Amino acid sequence: MSNYLMPYFYFNGNCEEAVRFYESVLGGEVTIMHLGDTPPNPAFPVPDDMKNLVMHAELRRDDHVINFSDWFTTNVPYSTGNSISFALQFDTKEETKAMFEALSIGGTIDLDLQETFFSPFYGKITDKFGVMWQIVCNKA
């Protein structure tokens, strides 16, 4: 897999409905993971009322991918202005770290680079222009 750019749309609790709508209009194949489907983590328990929220969904058609999620960040309220980010994926930790550092200059680190269950290196940045980025290292 090589580097590529994809949009990441956020919704306020109605992500699955939106994904199904886009699937019906655009076609393609959808995969959905809810917060309740994630591996248990005692440090970050998922409240029962949030288990049906979409943690991550993808709509794939041909060579195109659109990502979706419900907004579940508690320290930043949902608004239309923060309903999209861009995800950049890289094959190595070195490439991932270099892009993370470059985009964070003058911006805000929303989530420092760290290992997650879906990536060996993942972080979030809001750049100096207010654009939100997710920087992801692909699994080996």
Image (tube, rainbow, N blue to C red):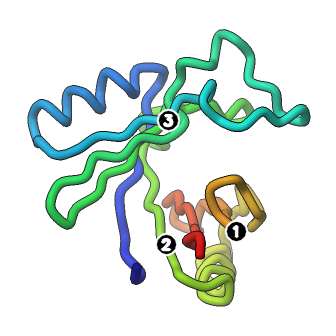
Q: Is residue 107 left or right of residue 90?
A: right
Mark drawn on residue 120: 1
Give SS at disc 2: strand
Task: State the CA–CA distance, disc 1 to disc 3.
Answer: 19 Å
Q: How many marks?
A: 3
Residue at the disc numbered 2 = 89
Residue at disc 1, secondary structure: loop
Nearest to viewer (mark 1 / mark 2)? 1
The mark that comes first in sequence, 2 or 3, is 3
Which corner quadrant holds the C terminus? bottom right
Disc 1 crowd rating (10 Å Cα; few below 14, some 14-19, many 20+) is: some
- Give whichever of discs 1 and 3 has the lower sequence position: 3
Q: Residue at x 69, y 53 (%)?
A: 117
Furthest-top residue in view? 49
Q: Residue at x 16, y 46 (%)?
A: 28
Q: Quadrant of the N terminus?
A: bottom left
Q: Residue at x 63, y 24 (%)?
A: 36
Badge 2, how many Cα within 10 Å: few under 14, some, many 20+? many
Query: Percent from the top left, x then y, of residue 100?
Result: 64, 76
Image vertical order of residue 16 relative to residue 136, above or below: above
Compared with residue 64, is residue 40 higher up or lower down, i.e. above or below? above
Which is in the foreground here, disc 2 or disc 3? Answer: 3
Instruction: Please state which of residues 101 and 65 is positioned toward the viewer in this rendering.
Output: 65
How packed mark 3 is, by other alpha carbons closer than 10 Å (few <14, some 14-19, many 20 or more), is some
Q: Residue type at mark 1: give it.
A: Pro
Residue 82 in percent (x, y) is at: 49, 43
For residue 139, what is the image quadrant?
bottom right
What label sits on residue 53 in the rendered view? none
Find the distance from the CA under tag 2 to the CA under tag 3. 19 Å
Instruction: Find disc 3 in the rendering and name its residue.
Output: 33
On the image, the x and y values in percent for residue 129 come to 51, 65
What amino acid type is highlighted by mark number 3? Met
